[in-house]
Amino acid sequence: MRAIETVKVGIAEMKVVVAPTVIRTCGLGSCVGVVIYDSGKALAGMAHVMLPHSSMARGGVVNEAKYADTAVEALCKLVIAAGGRKAMLKAKLAGGAQMFSFSSTSGDMMRIGARNVEEVKRQLERLHIPVVAEDVGGHSGRTIEFNPQTGMLSIRTASQEIKEI
């Protein structure tokens, strides 16, 4: 029996896989792992989103995978290009933790995790892709792995048991 291949998605990257390959990303603190998948085709894409808005980019070219406002649509297009059916797409999310405590004077700017989650959800809603499960917020980092064959997202959080959604 062959070992199942795992494709790793780095920070500010996105990739698409077809079963039996699984897809994983590590180091989700305030970042959000977005999975868009078509279970009938057993394929999925994952993006490791760092920041909510591409307006935060400095300099020339914007890395679409880095920002929630660009990554979700770009990932959707990748999944469709790989054979996913727009009407059948669903999403699962994890991450968006508040990793550090800040004084109340730092305000909304330091709520990166919550703002990432809000923007990812806003973009998914705009594209009419339902969020069917999520594990977001809190104060701990996560590692996630999605199996497009089963549609299960495994979430490993520090000092907790592995959760499947």
Image: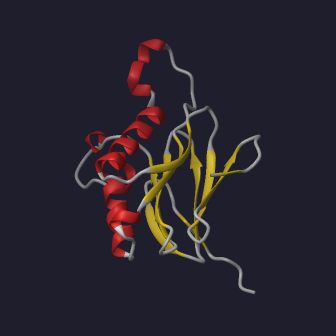
Task: Pick out the residue farthest to the bottom.
Answer: 1
Which quadrant holds the N terminus?
A: bottom right
Task: Give the image's coloring scheme.
Answer: secondary structure
Q: Is residue 79 left or right of residue 165?
A: left
Q: Pinpoint residue 84: horizontal percent, then vertical percent.
A: 39, 71
Q: Quadrant of residue 151?
A: bottom right
Q: Relative to residue 42, is residue 164 depicted above or below?
A: above
Q: Nearer the viewer, residue 14 or 62?
A: 14
Q: Relative to residue 119, is residue 78 depicted above or below?
A: below
Q: Nearer the viewer, residue 13 or 115?
A: 115
Q: Quadrant of residue 20?
A: bottom right
Q: Residue at x 40, y 37 (%)?
A: 118
Task: Pick out the residue farthest to the left.
Answer: 60
Q: Is residue 134 left or right of residue 61?
A: right
Q: Pinpoint residue 162: horizontal percent, then vertical percent.
A: 73, 50
Q: Residue at x 49, y 46 (%)?
A: 32
Q: Relative to residue 117, is residue 78 depicted above or below?
A: below
Q: Residue at x 62, y 52 (%)?
A: 165
Q: Residue at x 57, y 27 (%)?
A: 100
Q: Nearer the viewer, residue 54 or 120?
A: 120
Count of marks placed on residues:
0
Q: Nearer the viewer, residue 91 or 15?
A: 91
Q: Is residue 8 left or right of residue 125?
A: right
Whether residue 159 can be seen here: yes
Q: Pinpoint residue 153: horizontal percent, then vertical percent.
A: 61, 57
Whether residue 34 can be seen here: no
Q: Is residue 19 left or right of residue 112?
A: right
